[in-house]
Image (cartoon, grey):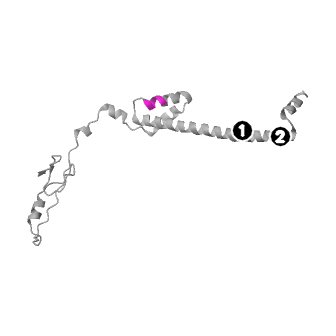
Amino acid sequence: MAQCAECGAYVNEGIKFCTECGNAMDTGDNADAEAKPRGSQTAEPHPVSPSYYKPAPSPARAEMPAAADKTRAVMSTAGFFGWTLLFGIPVLGWLICLISAFTGGNLNRRNYSRALIIFFLIGLAFSILFYLAFNWVFGLLFNDIMGTTNDVLGNVGDMIKLFNSFK
């Protein structure tokens, strides 16, 4: 077996690249190829394909701390449904959503809370824009209607005073 000069992993003979790091292996074929004259071609036996090296799983990946298991645990559909109902409570749910978005805990719940806050802020921005746009449009229409009525019927305030005098 040859040893990789880059990472030190053992690689079967005849392999051109390291199976661990991908570094080109120095097999010595280049020196043989340069020594042979171009005109002489000899048939060399085809090398048997080697079995591929499968490294054992590293212990760092196999063992995860207990704290990481709790924060990375997948939240179930019922969990998402329950948190959605909880966040839907008018004031208390919003406070819980803010707290769960910026404190430690389950990553799924924290990201879900952050997504709900972003949706809430987008909805709030659109609500303000629509309020201002409708207020401006309907304000113009109301002023236009009132101006037309004042021209046709006279002053509306005088009509109200006249109506109140019949009581």
47 versus 109 height, above or below: below
Quadrant location of residue 91?
top right
122 versus 17 height, above or below: above
Q: Left or right: where does residue 139 sit relative to residue 5? A: right
Residue found at the far right of this picture: 166
| Residue 8 sits inside the magenta stretch | no
Q: Nearer the viewer, residue 121 or 58?
A: 121
**Residue at disc 2, secondary structure:** helix
Q: Which residues are magenta?
A: 98-102
Q: Amino acid at mark 1?
A: Gly
Residue found at the far left of this picture: 35
Residue tagged 2: 149
- Residue 122: x %, y % from top left: 54, 39
Quadrant location of residue 104?
top left
Q: Main secondary structure of the magenta part?
A: helix
Q: Nearer the viewer, residue 60 or 2?
A: 2
Residue found at the far bottom of this picture: 39
Q: Quadrant of the C terminus?
A: top right
Quadrant location of residue 108?
top left
Question: What label does residue 139 carry, if any?
Answer: 1
- Residue at 33% over, 31% down: 67
- Residue 127: x %, y % from top left: 60, 38
- Residue 110: x %, y % from top left: 43, 34
Tell me if label 1 and label 2 are in contact, CB under 8 Å: no
- Residue at 45% over, 32% down: 101
Q: Left or right: where does residue 158 sit relative to residue 42? A: right
Q: Amino acid at mark 2?
A: Thr
- Residue 63: x %, y % from top left: 26, 36
**Residue at disc 1, secondary structure:** helix
**Sequence order check, earlier mark of 1 and 2:** 1
Q: Nearer the viewer, residue 127 or 60?
A: 127
